[in-house]
């Protein structure tokens, strides 16, 4: 993963810092220490439209280029949420991998995917979201197929994200924010009728079949299992 020229120069000439690298066959991660907030924002501008995730936490910054498996898993879970919301007539707004940052907290990151559900009315019609004035996403999807170098969970908690959906490549767990920290729950507060294990099974199935067939199966399952169970007799 190559750094943009402007950011490379910042690191070389202004920030003679320690760089830690964690690399596997499919993902690359770099850690920069003692990075000022303005430098973080400069990196964000330089990486605009590049598929690189920046995580910033009080002077430490991680750069990560996601693997195929990582990105596809996040996309599939996001699609599942969209189908579920559509079939149950639940208003949502998807935020994709928008950069969310709080200068006052000195924290910023891009979720793998995110959605507004309870706070959807407060975001509807907005062209930009600023956490200085707007609420954070209600649901964040965090794919953890390989370990991240910074505590992203702690950043989500500090920002006040209500639900964290964590997928490790096999298991999907859902955690709810309570008293400043996350506690694992059996079901999503936003979609309480869906078992997280079933979502994980669908994600695993998607790697074996084409997406059109998979999408049909997900939609039919939601209609048969979720929608019909809530229909009045």
Image (spheres, rainbow, N blue to C red):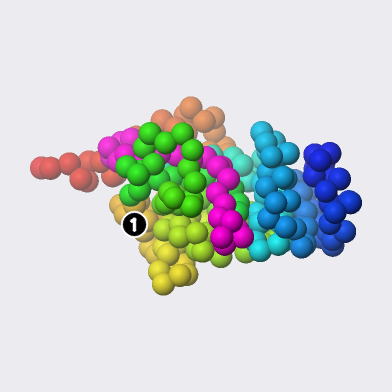
- Position of the N terminus by quadrant: top right
User: In front: 143, or 226?
Assistant: 143
Locate residue 150 relative to residue 136 in the image: left or right: right
Check disc 1 and report its element: helix, strand or loop. loop
Q: Residue furthest top?
A: 212
Q: Is residue 163 visible?
A: yes
Residue lying furthest bottom: 179
Q: Residues within 10 Å of mark 1 (few under 14, many from 20)?
A: some
- Which corner quadrant of the image does residue 46 belong to? top right
The quarter of the displayed image where residue 192 is located: bottom left
**Quadrant of image for the C terminus:** top left
User: Can residue 111 be seen in this snapshot?
Assistant: no
Which residue shows up at 61% across the image and 42% down it?
71
Q: Residue at x 20, y 45 (%)?
A: 230
Q: In the rendered view, does 137 fall on the left or right side of 37?
A: left
Q: Which residue is mark 1?
A: 189
The x, y position of residue 28, in whole percent, is 76, 49
Q: Nearer the viewer, residue 195 or 79?
A: 79
Magenta residue span: 84-107
Provide residue 16's location: percent of width, then percent of height. Answer: 87, 59
Q: Nearer the viewer, residue 144 or 197?
A: 144
Q: Position of residue 203 (x, y in %)?
A: 51, 44
């Amino acid at each position: 993963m190559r750094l943009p020229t402007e950011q490379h120069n910042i690191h070389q000439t202004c920030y003679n810092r320690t760089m830690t690298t964690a690399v596997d066959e499919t993902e690359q991660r770099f850690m920069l220490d003692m990075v000022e907030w303005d430098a973080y924002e400069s990196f964000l501008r330089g990486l605009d439209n590049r598929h690189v995730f920046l995580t910033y936490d009080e002077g430490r910054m991680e750069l990560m280029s996601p693997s195929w498996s990582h990105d596809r898993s996040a996309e599939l879970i996001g699609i599942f949420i969209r189908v579920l919301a559509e079939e149950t007539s639940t208003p949502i707004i998807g935020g994709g991998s928008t950069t969310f940052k709080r200068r006052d907290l000195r924290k910023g990151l891009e979720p793998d995917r995110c959605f507004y559900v309870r706070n959807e009315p407060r975001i509807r019609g907005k062209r930009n979201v600023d956490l200085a004035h707007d609420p954070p996403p209600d649901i964040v999807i965090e794919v953890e197929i390989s370990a991240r170098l910074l505590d992203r969970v702690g950043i989500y908690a500090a920002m006040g994200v209500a639900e964290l959906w964590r997928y490790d490549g096999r298991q999907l767990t859902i955690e709810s924010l309570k008293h400043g920290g996350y506690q694992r729950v059996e079901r999503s507060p936003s979609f309480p009728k869906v078992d997280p294990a079933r979502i994980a099974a669908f994600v695993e199935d998607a790697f074996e079949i084409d997406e059109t067939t998979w999408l049909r199966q997900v939609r039919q399952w939601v209609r048969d299992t979720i929608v019909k169970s809530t229909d009045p007799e």
